[in-house]
Image (tube, rainbow, N blue to C red):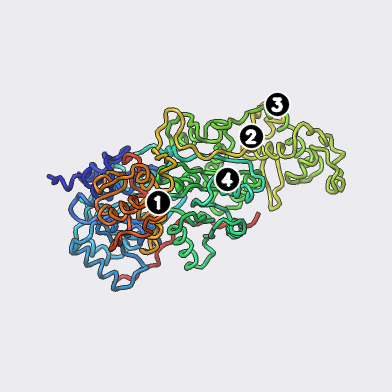
């Protein structure tokens, strides 16, 4: 029978500083503590890591965590050590002596958690080491990496199904932040977890405001988002190609926004330095391809922006989920236009693999198009994609500024008729620009050269402006009523085009709303929705919060650690609002655990007691902590609950083939 000190709720409070579990956390923890296997699907920021960290602290032995993120293991371990948790890792960044020391600590039972890359478990020497100690559990993080058609497939994960054969009495818990029902089933099958208990939390992230805007001048639109809504705040900008990454980062820096690039073409040392800066500096923007992001624990990312269309809803959800891990209001912003549709269709048509593979890619893309073109609540559509029900949220662009749906059958027929006449009467193929010029009756040099002003459809499209015609073409391509062909993006008819031309199919279209300056993301969700409560600061508390952030930044610089490792913004906001006058009162703040209270308590109380403008810049003497892995733990304040595209790249860097011995 567990002692009171070993009770999960006591560990949650003493180590992590939270009063209660949230969502299914408690049920998962108790199941694994009792020795059961589990497969956990929980959104980013939902508290996945606590689901294995607390059982590892409660059960006898060492929790072995399999993670693909060797570049982040150091930060994860530092954060745990700051909480008083005995944590270590083994990967290729260490020399032989460092690895021997960690292996000795494991064998002596001096660790609570040990992080390993999956490649390590291919080595017989690693397996023998694990047999010399006592394993409390195996946690398989980022479990979607095992799915062949998931967005981060990693072959090394396939061997993890053998763990239960070698350690049949050790519980396994596999965790992922995103999976459709098909990916869920594949994870269970490949990891031999069909008989495990499956926990599927709600994928709703009510603190994130989803917005998809018509693409005009994307870099300028991005600058408006950053300056107008998120000035001085951390964010991630995703681009499809390396060139776009470089140009966008340069543009932001020229406009006075601190930004760094990240893509696979950069030198590994530069990539690591830029990632480290992003984690450790307040208010930095990283511009990246999808090579960046998986496992990023930074809790205060206030926006994620996409300048190019993601390839799937799963990828979009995973990437946008890196915003607002602390539960505070954040923005997921996507600029979407006709060229995105053309480019993505072209990428699928020229992709490697068989027809079945291309059909799967097309199905993923169709779902992404549907999300972009919907006139309904975006959050509802996102949840439905993952097999969950939702209600209109009141905190996405289609709820805040409802778009109109209109009968686009006649305009669609005009576009398709123009393409048909060029394709069949003239044996010619042209791109979108020429089609629109013909419809608008423009006598351009190209129109005159090919005699297109003699076509019967010349000038029949005066009822719509050019931007509206581009929207019509975009939606026709997205719905497969029109196709893109060749290197020049020429338009051709599809099998379904005849249904529209023959009047047998209506074409309802989405009218892009007028561009208006968006309000900052709401601090609460819509009717009937649950969001993490953000502490609203009074005019008197705001400067105190800023002083606490300055103190935290100084402490982080001194330790060489990310600021969030000291405390999350949400915790500092509560401290500023409550103004605790004693260690006991400070210990009641969400996110202030036993270890942090001892290390930082007096420094914070001294800052709060100091006259305004004279608060100490550093911490109490001897304070040298790092901090909590709160990113995946319960968010404070909540109860614990163009150019050539970048080749398909995973969001991880595989560990070099280790030597056995």
Residue 198 in view (yes/no) = no
Of mark 3 and mark 2, the one earlier in the sequence is 3
Q: Nearer the viewer, mark 4 or mark 2?
A: 4
Image mark for residue 247: none
Instruction: Give the left or right position of residue 289, taking residue 563 as reference.
Output: right
Image mark for residue 612: 1
Q: Nearer the viewer, residue 506 or 438?
A: 438
Residues tagged 3 and 2 counted as in contact (Cβ below 8 A)? no
Residue occupied by mark 3: 503
Marks 3/2: CA–CA distance: 28 Å
Marks 2/1: CA–CA distance: 47 Å
Marks 3/4: CA–CA distance: 46 Å
Of mark 3 and mark 1, the one earlier in the sequence is 3
Residue occupied by mark 4: 228
Of mark 4 and mark 1, the one earlier in the sequence is 4
Q: Residue 24 placed where, x, y %?
A: 31, 38
Marks 4/2: CA–CA distance: 19 Å
Residues tagged 2 and 1 counted as in contact (Cβ below 8 A)? no
Residue occupied by mark 2: 513
Q: Which of marks 4 and 1 is in front?
A: 1
Residues tagged 4 and 2 counted as in contact (Cβ below 8 A)? no
Q: Tell me the element at label 4.
A: helix
């Amino acid at each position: 029978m567990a002692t009171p000190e070993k009770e999960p709720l006591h560990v949650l409070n003493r180590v992590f500083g939270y009063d209660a579990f949230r969502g299914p956390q408690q049920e998962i923890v108790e199941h694994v503590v009792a020795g059961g296997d589990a497969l956990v699907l929980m959104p980013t920021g939902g508290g996945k890591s606590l689901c294995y960290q607390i059982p590892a602290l409660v059960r006898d032995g060492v929790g072995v965590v399999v993670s693909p993120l060797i570049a982040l293991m150091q930060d994860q371990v530092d954060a745990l050590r700051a909480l008083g948790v005995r944590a270590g890792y083994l990967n290729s960044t260490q020399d032989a002596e460092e690895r021997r020391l960690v292996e000795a600590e494991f064998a002596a039972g001096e660790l609570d958690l040990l992080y390993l890359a999956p490649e390590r478990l291919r080595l017989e020497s690693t397996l023998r080491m694990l047999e010399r100690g006592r394993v409390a559990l195996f946690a398989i993080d980022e479990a979607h990496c095992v799915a062949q058609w998931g967005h981060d497939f990693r072959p090394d994960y396939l061997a993890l199904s053998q763990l239960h054969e070698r350690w049949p009495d050790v519980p396994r818990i596999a965790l992922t932040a995103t999976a459709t029902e098909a990916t869920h089933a594949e994870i269970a099958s490949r990891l031999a977890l069909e008989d495990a208990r499956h926990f599927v939390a709600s994928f709703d992230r009510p603190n994130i405001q989803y917005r998809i805007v018509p693409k005009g001048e994307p870099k300028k639109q991005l600058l408006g988002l950053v300056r107008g809504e998120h000035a001085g705040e951390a964010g991630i900008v995703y681009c499809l190609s390396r060139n776009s990454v470089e140009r966008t980062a340069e543009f932001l820096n020229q406009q006075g926004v601190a930004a760094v690039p990240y893509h696979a073409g950069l030198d590994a040392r530069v990539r690591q330095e830029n990632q480290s800066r992003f984690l450790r500096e307040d208010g930095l923007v990283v511009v990246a391809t999808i090579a960046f992001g998986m496992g990023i624990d930074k809790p205060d990312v206030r926006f994620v922006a996409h300048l190019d269309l993601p390839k799937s809803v799963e990828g979009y959800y995973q990437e946008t989920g890196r915003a607002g891990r602390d539960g505070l209001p954040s923005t997921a912003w996507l600029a979407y236009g006709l060229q995105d549709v053309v480019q993505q269709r072209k990428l699928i048509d020229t992709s490697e693999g068989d027809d079945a593979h291309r059909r799967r890619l097309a199905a993923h893309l169709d779902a992404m198009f549907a999300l972009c073109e919907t006139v309904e609540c975006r959050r509802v559509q996102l949840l439905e994609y993952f097999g969950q029900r939702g209600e209109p949220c009141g905190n996405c662009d289609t709820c805040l500024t409802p778009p109109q749906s209109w009968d686009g059958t006649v305009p669609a027929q005009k576009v398709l008729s123009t393409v048909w006449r060029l394709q069949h009467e003239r044996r010619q193929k042209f791109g979108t620009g020429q089609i629109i010029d013909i419809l608008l009756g423009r006598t351009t040099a190209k129109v005159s050269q090919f005699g297109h002003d003699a076509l019967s459809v010349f000038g029949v499209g005066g009822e719509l402006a050019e931007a509206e015609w581009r929207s019509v073409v975009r939606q026709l391509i997205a719905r497969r009523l029109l196709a893109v062909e060749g290197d020049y993006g020429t338009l051709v008819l599809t099998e379904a085009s005849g249904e529209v031309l023959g009047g047998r199919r209506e074409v309802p279209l989405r009218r892009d709303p007028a561009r208006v300056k968006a309000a900052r993301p709401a601090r609460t969700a819509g009717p009937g929705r649950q969001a993490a409560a953000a502490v609203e600061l009074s005019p008197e508390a705001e400067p105190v919060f800023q002083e606490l952030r300055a103190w935290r930044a100084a402490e982080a610089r001194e330790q060489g650690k990310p600021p969030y490792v000291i405390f999350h913004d949400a915790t500092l906001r509560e401290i500023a609002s409550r103004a605790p006058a004693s260690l006991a009162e400070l210990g009641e703040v969400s996110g202030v655990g036993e270890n942090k209270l001892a290390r930082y308590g007096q420094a914070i109380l001294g800052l709060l007691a100091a006259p305004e403008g004279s608060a100490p810049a550093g911490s109490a003497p001897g304070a040298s902590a790092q901090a909590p892995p709160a990113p995946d733990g319960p968010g404070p304040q909540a109860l614990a609950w163009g150019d050539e595209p970048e080749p398909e790249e995973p969001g991880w860097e595989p560990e070099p083939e280790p030597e056995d011995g």
